[in-house]
Structure formats: C-alpha cells, structure tokens
Image: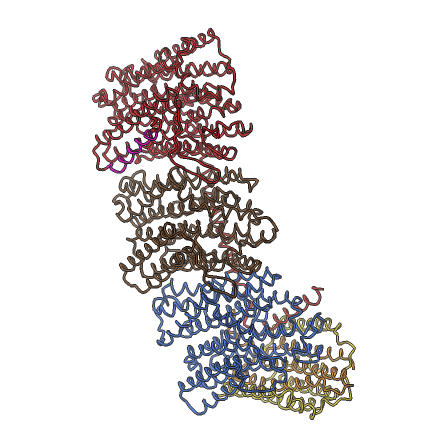
Amino acid sequence: MLIERYIYLAIALFCIGIVGVLARRNAIIIFMCIELMLNAVNLLLVAFSKMHHAAAVAKGSTAGIEGQLFVFFIMVVAAAEVSVGLAIIVMMYRNTHSVDVNFLNRLKH
Amino acid sequence: MNAIVISAVLGVVMMFCGVFTNSKPAVRTVAVIGLLGLIIANVLDMGGYHFFNVNVRGMLAFDVFGLLFNTIAFAATWIYFLLSGRDMERVGVNLAEYFALIFFVLCGIAIVSAFNSLLMLFLGIEIISIPLYILTGSDKRNLKSNEAALKYFLMGSFSTGIMLMGITLLYGVKGSFNMDVIRAGSSTLTPMLAAGLLLLLFAMSFKVSAVPFHFWTPDAYDGSPTVFTSFMATIVKVAGFIAFIRLFEGCFGEMHKQWQLLAAIITAATLFIGNITAVFQQSVKRMLSYSSIAQAGFMLFALVAMNNTAKEGLIFYAAAYSLATIGIFAVLLKMKDYTFEGFNGLAKRQPVLAATNTIFLLSLAGIPATAGFWAKFYMLSAAIDNGNVMWLVIVGVLCAAISVYYYFRVIQAMYFKDGEPQEIETSRSFKGLLIVIAAAVVLLGIFPHWLINQLYSFFYL
Amino acid sequence: MNVLQLVWLVPFFPLVGFLVNGLLRKQLPKSLVSIIGSGMVLASFIVSVLLFSEVKQGNTAVVNLFDFISVDTLKIPFAFQIDQLSSLFLLIITGVGFLIHVYSAAYMHEEREEHFGRYFCYLNLFVFSMLLLVLGANYLIMFIGWEGVGLCSYLLIGYWFKNTEYTNAAKKAFIMNRIGDLGFLIAIFWIIAKLGTVTYTTTDGAGVFDLYEKLTRTDVIGITLLLFVGATGKSAQIPLYTWLPDAMAGPTPVSALIHAATMVTAGIYMIARSNVLYTMAPETQSVVAAIGLATALFAATIAIKQNDIKKVLAYSTVSQLGYMFLGLGVGAYTGAVFHVMTHAFFKALLFLGAGSVIHAMHHEQDIRRMGGLAKKLPITHLTFLIGCIAIAGIPPFSGFFSKDEILAAAYSKDHIYYYLGIAGAMMTAFYMFRLYATTFLGRFRGTEEQKHHLHESPAAMTIPLIVLAILSVAGGFIGVPEVIKPGAHWLEHFLAPVFEPSARIKGEVHHLDHNTEYMLMGLSVGLAVIAILVALFRYSKKPEVHEPAGFGKVLADKWYIDELYGFVIVKPVNWLAKWLNSFFEKKFIDGLVNGVGRLVNYSSRQVRLLQSGFVGNYVLLMVLSMLALFVVTFFIKK
Amino acid sequence: MALGSAIMVVISRNPVHSVLWLIITFFAISGHYILMNAQFLGIVNLIVYAGAIMVLFLFVIMLMNLNAETEPQKNKWLKLAGVVAGGCLLLVLVAALKQAEVKGKVAMLETGDIGLIRNLGKALFTDFVVPFEISSILFLSAMVGAVVIGKK
Amino acid sequence: MIPVLLIVIPLVSGLLAFLIKQEKSVKVWSLVTSLITMVVAILGIAVLHKPEYLQTNVAWLPNLNSNFSLTMDGMSKLLCLLTGIAYPGIFIATWNSTYKNPHQFYALMLLMQTGLLGVFVASDALLFYFFWELALIPAYFLCSIWGGERRVAVTFKFFIYTFVGSLLMLIGIIWVYLHTPDHSFAMTSFYKVNLPGNTQGWLFWLFFLAFAIKIPLWPFHTWQPDTYEQSPTAVTMVLSGIMVKMGVFGVLRWLAPVLPVGLWGYGDPAATMCVIGMIYASFVAMQQDDLKRLVAYSSIAHMGLMGLAIFVTSSIGIQGVMIQMFNHGINIIGMWIVVELIERQFGTRKMSELGGLAQKAPGLAIMLVVVALANVALPLTNAFIGEFMMFNGVFSSKASNYHYIFMVVGGISIILSAIYTLNMIQKVFYGNTSSLTANARDIRVNEKFVLAVLLIGIVIMGVYPKPMIEATKHAVDAIYSKMFIKLP
C-alpha cells in the first residue's frame, strides 16, 4: 500500500480529532479527541517506520524500529496524561458538578 | 547527566519526606539543601566531574550552553525556594509533593536543555508539563485554580498532539529522531519537512506562550496559585526557550532563512499582543502574565536572529528575567490585593519592598543599570546583527516603550499614590534576600561582563 | 599718547554714572545722583570736545579695545572709530545730553529718591549706548549700541511703570525697533557672508568700505535696503513710525533727548556712515528718498490736527526725520547730518520748552486747555518761539540752512521731490505756529488752580532752554550755503573725508545755478511765512476746542494707521497665537501624542477581549492561525 | 472504518457512546498495525488504549453519570466554525503533503520482523534505555500528581 | 581622573544622602557636594588641563569592546562647568524651599547630576547611552513625587516619550557599532565608521528622533511645557538648564560627526522643523498665562535655534551653539529662579494674578528684567553672542540651499521673543499691584547672591566671550572637520 494513503488517513484522523476539540464542550470528549489525535500520530509513525524499514530491508537492518518505539513511548505518556487529566476533570466535577469546559469562565480578558 | 539523575532522585526523596515527616520547615530545609546540592552537582558537571557515566546512545548531548542554563535555572529556583518556599504552605497540605513535583520539573528542564533526540524532547517536555498541570490545579477548592488546570491541561495536550504530528512528519522524511541525522543535509524545505517544521514551531510556540498560541498563558498563570505562577512564568518558561532554540538550531539551523520570516511574524505578534494587552489589566498578577508573554516576544528574538549573540543573550535574558520576576512575585505573594490599587502607597509602609520591586520592574522594562537592559540589548543587537529583520527591531523597541507603561503603573502606585494600609508580614531575612537580589540585578546591570565572561569562557573553552 | 586713544573715556563716564546711580540709587541723595548723572555726561562732553579739536586737525583713528568675537575667519574687535562724523555726533549727544540731564534734575525733582536714581541711571545708560552706536568701528558695535538705545528707550518710556498705557507704549517701541533690528542684523550677516568682515574701514584696506567693489549689484541693494529697514525702525519712518508718538509717554526730557535729538537720528547716522554702499545703490536711494518724503508729508498732516503738545512735537520729529532721509536719499549726506544737528538743537529746545509748559501746568498736555502762557512763562515763551521759527525754516535761524540744503539737493535730483518737500515745510510752519499760538497766545483756558500755580520754571530748566535757543539761532552758520558766501559751508568741508568715497563714486555733481537756488530759497521762505501768518491769524484768537470732524478727524485720528496695524497685524498675530495654542498645540500635536497613548489603551481594551475565557475559542483561534501560517508558508511564499 | 467511527466519536451526543466509538476506532487502528506487521504494537494498543485507558474513561463517565443532556448545546456558529476550520486544516495539510517527498514509497510490508516483541525489546533496553528510564520519572510525577489532586 | 571624580562624587554622595534624614544637614551635605563637584570641574578646566588628567579608560565590557572611557574636550568642559556651577546655584536659590522627604529629594538630585555629567564626559557610545538613561530615572522620580497636581501623568508622558527616542537611538548605536571597523563602542571608532549614504540616512532619523525629543524640537516638544510646569522648580532648572543640552550635545557629539552624510542629506527637513518650532513656540508662548509654561515655550524656541544652527551646518554656527548651550543654561536657570521666587511667595504663577511687583520688589524686578533681556538676546548679554553666531552661521552656511530662508524666518522669532518677554515683564512687574502682590517682599540674600552671580556671568560673557570661544574652538574644529569626510 502506498504511504500517501496512510498519510491521508492519519491526517484525516488527526483533523477529526481537532474538529472534536473545537466542536465539543464536554471535557472528557475533548480529551478523547486528543487521544484520537495521538492515535493518528501513532498510526502514521508505524506507517513511516515500515516505510523506512522497507527501504532498508535488503540490508537486514533494524531501520525503522525507532518509530515503533516512539509509539510505545507515546502510549506511555498518554497513559500518564490520562491519569492526570482525568484527575483534573474529576476534581473539577467534584467542585462544579459539570464537565462543561465553558462552565468555568472566571479567567478571562 | 548529574542534574537529571539527581533532580529525579531528589524528587523521590521529597516524596518520601512527605511520608516520613509532617514538619514543614524540615521539608523545606531538605528541599533547599537538596537543590543546593543539585546546583553544585551541575556546576561540577560543567567542570568535568561527571558522577554518572551513562551511555546515552545519542539521546542526550550535554554542552555548556545547556549546562549553564541549568545552573541558572536551578539557581533561580533556589532563590525562588528561599523567597517563596514558605508561601507554598498556604496552597495546600501536600508541601513535600509540591517540592517533589518541582524537582521533577527541574529534571525535565535538565532534559530539554540537553536533548539530542526528538524523543527526549518529547519526554522532557511532558515531564515538565505534567507536574505543572498538577501544580496549576493544586489549589483544589479554588475554582480559578481548577479552571486554570483544566484549560492548561486540555490545551497542553492538544499542543502535544501537534508536536507529535510534527515529529512524525520529520521522521517520515528523515527516518530518525536523532537530531544529528535530521540536521544533516537540510538545505531545502520540502513540503513534508516544512509541515513538520511548522507543526513543531506551533507546538514550541505554545510552550513558550508565543502569540497566537499564548491563550493558555494568562488564564493558567492567573488561575494557578501565585507561588507556582512565579515558578511557571520564569524558570519553566525560559526552559521552553532553551528547548525551542536547541530544537530549531539543531534541526533547522541551516535553513534558517526560510523560516525566519515566520518566526519574525510570531515574534512581532507576541510583542504586540503581549504588551498591548498588558496595558489594560487591573490585576498585577495578570499583568505579569501578559508581561511574560511580552518578554517571551523579546526572547524570541534569539530564535529569529539565531546567532551566537542571540544565544548568549538568551542565557542572560533568562537570568535577568527570572530574577526580576521571581522577586516581584515574591512581593506580590505577600499582598492580599493583587490589583494595582493594592500596591498603592507601598513605598510608605514597606520602603524596602517598594524599592526592590522598583528595581525589578525597571529591569523588566529594560532600563540601563539593571540586568534587564543588557538582556534587551543583547536581543536587539542580535537581531540588528542579523540584519534582515530591522522592522522587527523597531516593533521591538516600540513595544518596549509600551511595556514601560504598565511596569511603571506599579511604580506609580507604590510611590505616588496613597492607599489603604495593608498588613504585610515580612521577615527580616526575606527583605535581606530581596535586597541581595536587587543588588544582583543592579550589579549585573552595571557589570554584565561577569556573567558574559562566564558565557564566553564556556563557549570558547 | 594720542588724545584719540582716550576715546574709550567717552562712553566710560556714562557707564560709571549708570553703575553708580544704578547700584546706589537708594543710598544716594537726589542732588548727588543728579550731579553724578550730569557730571559724567559733562565729562564725556569735555573729552568729546578734546577729541573734536583733534579731529578738526584731520586726525582720525580706530581704537581697538579687545577682541569681541573672533571665530574662524570672522574677527570682530571691540573697537571705536573716531572721525569727523562720529566726533560731530559725539558733540551733539554729549552736549545736548548734558543740557537735558541738567534740565531733568529739576524736572524730575518730584520723583521718589530711588526712582530718581533709576531715571538717571537709565539716562546714563542711554548716553552710553548711544555713544557706542556712534563710536563703534564696525557694524556689530553699532548694532550693540543700536539695541542698547532701544532698550533704554523702552525703559524710559515705561519709566512710570504703574501706568499700563505707558508700558504698552514702551513695549510697542521696543518691538517695532526689533523689527527694524532684524533687518539690520540680516544686513550684517549679508555683509559678513560676502566680505567676511563688518569693520567699516581698516588701514590695510580690508574693511567693508574698502572692499565694497566686491559686492554685486544685488548684494548692495539688498544690504542697503535691509539697513534701511533697520533705520526705519529706529528713526520712525513709514511703516514703522507709530511707536514714536506713543513714546511721548516717557518723561519730557527723555522725549527731548531720545525721541528727538539723538536716538531717532541713529538711522541717519547709520546711512551716512554707510554712504558708500548707498551711493552704489541708486535704487535704494530712491526708496529712501521716497519713504523719507512720504513720512515727512504724512506725519506733517497728522501733526496739524493734534492737540497734545508732545504729540505735535513727536509728529513733527517724524516729519523732520523724513526730511533727513530725503536728504540721504538724494545724496545730500552732509545736508542730512546738518539737519540732524540743527534739529537736535531746536527740537530739544521745543521739547524742553514743552516740558517747561507741562511742568508749569501740572502735567497738563492738552493745548486746548492752555493759552496765553506767554506772559506767565516769558523765558519759555521766547525760547519756544525761537524753536518754532527755527523749525519753520525762517532765515537766519538754523533750520533754514539745513532744510534748505536738503531741498536744494532734492530739487537737483528731481523737481517733484522739491515741490512735495516744500509743501511739507509749509505744513511744518503751519502746525508749529498753530501749536505756538494755541499755547502761548490768546487767553488762558485751564482751571483756576492751574492758573494760580502758573510760574516760570527754575533755572536748571531755563538755562538749558536758553543755551539751546542760542544754538538754534546760531547753529545754522556752520553750514551757510555756498551761494550766500562761498567757502562758508564749514560742515561740508569738515565732513568731506567721510563722504569722500561716495563723492568719488558719484563723480561730478551737477550744481544748481545761483539764481535757481535763490529762487528756491525765496519760495520756501515765502510759503513758510504765509503758513505762519495763517496759523497765527487763525489760532491766536479762537483756538479750536471742539472735536474735529470730517477730514480733520481722519487727521486727528492719525489716518487710523494704528487701527489699521491693529487690524492687519496685531489681531491676526494674536489670533494665530491663540489658534496655535488652543487648537494646534493642545488638540493637534498633543492630541496626536496623547492619541497614541489612547490608541494603545483602546487597542488594549479591544485586544484583551480575545482572551474570552473559553477554551473552545482559544483552540479555534490557534487552529485558525495555524491555518493562516500554513497558507502563508505553502501557498503565498511560492 | 477508522474514519467513520472517529467521526462518530465526535458527533455522538452521549459520552458513553463516544467512548464505545473510540474503542472501535482503536480496534481499526490496531488492525492497521497488524496489517503492517507491527503485531506487538497492535496488541499493546488494544490492551493499553482500548482496554485500560478507555475503561478508565468509561469509569469516570459512569461515575459522573453523564449523558447526552448534560452537555448543553454549544453555539451553532462556533461549532460550524470549528468544523470548517478543521476541514480547512485537513485540506491544507493534504494539499501540502500531496507533493510530499516520500510519495510513492511503500509502507505495507508483510515481511520484516521489527514489529516483533523480541526486536523491540532488544532495542528498548539498549538504544532506548535512557528514555525508558526517564519515562519512569514521568510516571512517578503523574502518580504524585494524581495523588495530590485526587486526595481529598 | 577629573571626569571620574565628576561622576563618582555626586554618585557616592547621592547614595549617602539617602541616609541623612535631617532636612538641614541633607541640604548642607548636598550643597557641599555640589560645591566640591564644581571645584573639581573648574580644576579640570583651569588647572589640571593636561590630557592625562582629563581622560580615563578602564575596561568595562571587554567582550563588546566597550570601555569605561571618559574624556573631557572643550565641549565637555563647557557643559561640565555649566552643570558644576548650576547645581550649587540651584541649591542655594532653592534653599528656602521645603520638600517632604528632603533626603530623597536631594539624593535623587545628586544622582541626576551623575547622569548628566556622565553623558557629557562619556566617550564610549554604550556608556553614553547608559548615562543618558540614567539621568532620566531620577528625573522621573523627582518630578513624579514632588511635582504639581498633574505630575504623575505628565511625568509619565515625559518618560515614555524620551524613552522611545532613546530606544531608537540604541538601535542606531548598535547598528553603527556592528559596522565599526574594529567592532567597538569607542567614540574614535564611531568616528571612523564610514557608512553608505542611504544607511546614514535612516540612521540619522533614529538618532535624530532621540535627540529631537530631548532637545525638544517641534513637533516632539509637547512633553516639555507640561513637565516644566509640573516639576518642582529646582528640577525644572536642571531639566531645562542642563538636561535639554544633552540633546544638543548628543547631536554634536554622536550624530553630526558619525553620520555626516545623513546630516547633509536630511539637514533641510530637520532644519525646517527647527524653524517651524522657533516661530511656533514663540507664538504659543505669547498666549501663555503661566510663567513656567511661558519660559518653557521660550526655551523650545531657543533650543530650536540651536538645532537650526547645527542642521544648517557651519563652523561659526556650531561655535555659537556651543556657547549658547552654556549661556542658555545660565539664563534659563536665572529665569526659573525668579519664577520660583514668585511662586513661593505668592503661590501662583499666573501672570494675570500678579502685577506691580516692580514697586514692591524692585530687586527681583531688576534681576528678572536683566535675565529676560538676556533671554531675548540683547547685545552685551551672553545670549547675544551665541545667537549672533548661530544666525550668522545659518546665513552664511553652504550646507543648505535654503539657508537664507531659514535665517530670515527664524529671525522673526527674535521679534516674537521680544513680544512675549516684554509682555511677561509688563504683566508681572508693571502696572498696579494685585491683591496677591500688595504685601510682597523683596528677595532674600541667598537668592540675591545667586542671581547676582548669574547676572555678572551674563554680562561678562556677553562683553568678553573670548575665553569661552577659545575654550571650545578646538572641539568645534574637530566636529566640523569630521562633517566633511567623503562618501565611501
């Protein structure tokens, strides 16, 4: 499969994530959309990784493996972020009983 | 490497401190002493004493630039601990954890000042960011703090996504995350490379709160407990710059011409929005957060100019800006009223506070005989030396003039207006320390060559 | 040592007098003040006489005191020049000055001590400045004296400073003089720019009058015109004459000294001094003659309808100065200087006489309230009459000779000058005798109290009158025309070295034949006599007491020139100043500056609204700007 | 399928449904991984994302008892603007990357064993040991953070 | 040696003055300090005039090639002398004024003196800039704390305005620095730099703006009347007597010799601004009722003439400017002293509320009249020498095609200055006394002393200007010769 397909796919997913962030007000869903963006990135990374590997496969190298490891680290970070993020959202919910990002609007101008 | 390991260990130590002792002074003392140790370790590192010999496999690359920055950042943090450590107690009960988080942030700073792989950059930035999200939201009952944390977190993650996309695109082109590989042969800007560059530019702009990616800054700074704002607005922010300039010099240094205009546009916008918006603020704290955006605009000059003067200047700027801002925040922390009116008549009741504060503000405004002047001077001369962006220099000085407007509003409030007497408790040592810092600011303003010489001797060892 | 080296003593004495009287005015008694004041001028006079006798033998000198301004190639020494012209003026200034000082001591006796001291200190300062003006060996020193006398005139006009009208008059005098001074100054610059020096003449031939051939035609015309602008200011010619009548606000001796005898003749002195340049520029000469003649006629018309004794004399002065300029304009430099001298005598006499009258009338100046004073003030009456006859140009009084010389020269230049000039002379005779008749003849029209107190002035006042009267009678004999007695024109011979260069330029002068000259004399004398008789006939019995109407009113109101200036110059200037101050300065420039500040404030208020507090908006803005930057990078830059 | 379900994530009213859609997206992405012979990542993706993280999300949502009605309607125009902006970004990126320098290269490769756990592990503990250790700090701080914030 | 002392004495003494809380002693302290400074300045000028005493060169920022180098040439000497003389004069004349927190007031005054003297002796561009700004900060506080009602806003405007200018100049300095042959901030290197014409053109405007705001030239002057009006008079004296000279000094030292081509190229527009300013300020001065504002506008007009004489270059004109810098300082300080005396006694500066003072306070009246006459440049006062030379220089300049017009139009200001000055004298001193002035008293001994010294100075310099001309001749030649270097 050509790499462009993956690029388009990943970008599409990425942009859907962005649209989600833009269009929704529920903090959790926004957060999920961000996860979606990260996954788009992951997908693209793996694709690139395979691409680089394919280019160098003849030499039997391990080219491209960094890409996949990067994905691994992204997952790690994502997990950490999720824990913190959900903690913050829960904290907010505890105080306001809402997860609407626009509900809290004291800081402005 | 010393710094990274020791700061991480110190973070863990602080955690355990929290478990084993309830005495706040003890915790604070441990933190202060630990940080002092960290500074010493880092300085020793510069001098060639490496405690840990780890094969970093190209993931990190230590150079004097980064190490020197570390020293400054740690020293600033140390001063910050001394000045404002006591005020952390007022935020919440988890004092030890706060210190631990700050140490983790310092670890992240040490990483971003030495990364040689985009992976490490990513991790470093995350290590800086995640504790900050928490510190921002650490005043749990305060809705403002909640809000700030939420905003900061959502937007921060969003920018992380953008950065990752940028890294990925770079990887797609170059097949590696190692900066040495990426740098090699970057002479023309191909579309994917350009897209990656832009996305990274956006993400890093976000971290240093450059316009138009600054929106989180005022809210997050305003909402978070002031004591942490002080930390975020100074040390963390300049760390972002170190990462920024390291990344762009390392990866795209040779194609500088092609993105210079873009950087210049962002710089100009940052200067403009930061300064203009700060003018009309009613709260000094919020004014300072806008001012931090404005100062970021000046620091961005380093990115635009991208020469040796600029790098020296950035270090100097980091020191000057951090010192002054930490000082002001330390005073601000003692106030109950953060509006400009709160400062009315401060000079009468607390002449020392007012005088030192004045020196800090003058420094931020870039008046000669303060460190801030040289900071601006270096940035301007870097940009002038570059020669392509004279318009930006003009914008810069005009904005500097605007900045005088809001900094001096504080001075006016302190000296020329009478206000309600406000109870401000300050200890003798606190005042003494402020005076020392102010003296340092002035000394650096008169004899900048001390610091500059350090820079030089390191650069041209 | 050459006596001429002592020339610095001449201005030095009045300077000492100025300093002593100025600094010690509160301590010294009045008598001592007046003795110092007059004594110093007397000392100057004595030195002047010595100098004069030296100069008479043909010795002249330039005395360098010290370097004044010396930059680059421009070297201006503080130097005095003593020659025929300046020594003559020295005599006039110190001589008449001394008499007036003596007169003043009595006239101003009612003043408080410190003011008395102040008065003499000003007066001495004036004499000092006037001497500087005359003695200066270059234009800059002349300019110093020039402005100095302007200052003293200002101070003395405004001597009674409580009265706002007086101080207004003083201000007016100073400012109008300044306008002329600017012209003078520019002329000096012009000379420096072209010749690199302002010294009149040097032994090595590097002075202005030695190098005049280097000047182009434009230069000469420009310089002379600008100098003349200066002269119109100082010597009260059209269009800058209006300050002089107002200057009568000062004490009467001041009017006599400054505004009749000396200062106002500075312009004539200057042009006579620069005669070379003027001879080189016939165009300017015509202008000078035309302006002089116009002033002479114009002022004479006004004088006819004035009722203030000093105002009449003031306009008469303006008119006489016009004659002098006419003389200068037609090249009769000697005649002009001659007239300066005789005029100094008789006009000082007239003013002092008027002062005596005013003194006697307790500061009443309106001639409609006088009359019949001849009996009460015999000496004043007699001397005043002599003055009137002298100014009217009746032989053998001094005025006749000097005026006649000018008119004769005018005739030889252009007949029209002469006819107009003679008309003016007629008017002069008429208004002078109108004044005389109204004041001294007829019956007394003042209050009973004034009548009761009428008395002749003290000796300190009458003696100067008598001396001046003698001079007015006899002064003319130093300039008896050739036609009457060949070789009798002593003055012409005396001044010949000064005017020699211009005579050389002019070449052979066409002399009038004797018959014509006699005829001219006869005509002018005859007309003057007619005018005198008409005036005496008309005004000795029934003086005009009612307000003039019709054309007379126009004359009485001085052709409305003051109003015209007010309307054309003062008002617009004030209006402009007001507009600049209240609108341009405050609204426009400052508004612009503050506007920038306000703009910053305003934009601050607007821009901060971007920070809406909604995460969605923030992200949207971020995405949009990302979009924009992408577009910029990818689609625009290419 | 990935795209479709991703869109559903965004437009679902009910957060729970969103989560479910997201899980489906993740499955789809995992499928891609496996197609690309990155088996390990595919599995990890399922376990960590679809399993752990999404369950966490679900828990939180359930805990808060959220449903469609809790989210008030956002300004329609703003929503539209968001969609338009995102769409434009997509267009711009696609247009920009159309000329991408990697065009024409192949990514799908059945052979190759870099995706295997053995190779990944080896690389992880040799070349990538530093980031690996560093990420522990990250977790530590996240942990501390969760404690600080979560503690009553 | 001498220049270092000039800077250090007021600096140290100023810092120490912060600690002296007693009013009387702080006054004595600062007076003594200023006297010592004056003596040092005079020493440097009259006695120890060997170059080694007058130069200092210590490494300061070796990396930047910027040294702490101070030099006193003729122009510096003159201005140092002015500063040296003015300060004791100001202190004595305002001896009877009381300030709240006097120790701060006098300390700041002395610190300002440091800045001023530093500007005048610095021979390193960076150092110059340093002192340039440093003089501003104490001025800001002095005006803002002890000024009149609108002090805060007005001083703020003044500060920001001048700050903008100086920042622009900083850009220019850095640019020139980067293009000096040896990458140095030294004045000598700056003089050697040879920039292309168009570069000099825009650099000219950068420098010009800074100096024009300081001088101030029309239309950048609006900060000035407000600031003068609102500042305490002692500060106004320093501002107008000395600080504005910084602008002229800057042009002569850092603009004209460094960017001669720029000055030749844009001299005409700059000179036009000067001329407009002279006339304009004179007109506006005619409308003022407040004494301070009147003097302020008259100062604008006079400074405009100095600017004109520089921008329409000629040797004699520059010589005139130099002398006039000194003279104007003396004269305007005299004016302010009189204004201060009036204000302190009657509590008003409005001319319409005063009047008849000549009867009540003849001493004051005489002093004012003489100073005012010097202000209108009457011959035999010092200002006449300067103005004569400047106008003459303008007239005979070869640098501009419009020099005749400049001179003639500018000359009108001579007339206008007479109008407003005489108006002032008339309104304040002549006429009848008003209710305020009915019980006026004459001036005190200390005030009389200062004024008398000033008056004697005015007359001596007006009659015998030779020493001053000689002293500055060399500096003039140096500047003038540098303005004729060839284009690269």
Image quadrant in which the N terminus of chain C is located: top left
Q: Residue C261 appears in which quarter of the rendering?
A: top left
Q: Chain E is drawn in which colour?
A: brown
How many numbered tags mark residues here? 0
Specify whether residue C10 is painted magenta.
yes
Q: Residue furthest front?
A: C1
Image quadrant in which the C terminus of chain C is located: bottom right
Image position, residue C475 (x, y; %): 34, 16
Image position, residue C101 (x, y; %): 28, 27
- In the rendered image, what is the letter of the chain coloured blue? B
- In the rendered image, what is the letter of the chain coloured orange? A
Q: Residue furthest bottom?
A: D118
- In the rendered image, what is the letter of the chain coloured yellow? D
Q: Left or right of D105: which side holds E186?
A: left
Q: Nearer the viewer, residue A32 or C44?
A: C44
- In the rendered image, what is the letter of the chain coloured red? C
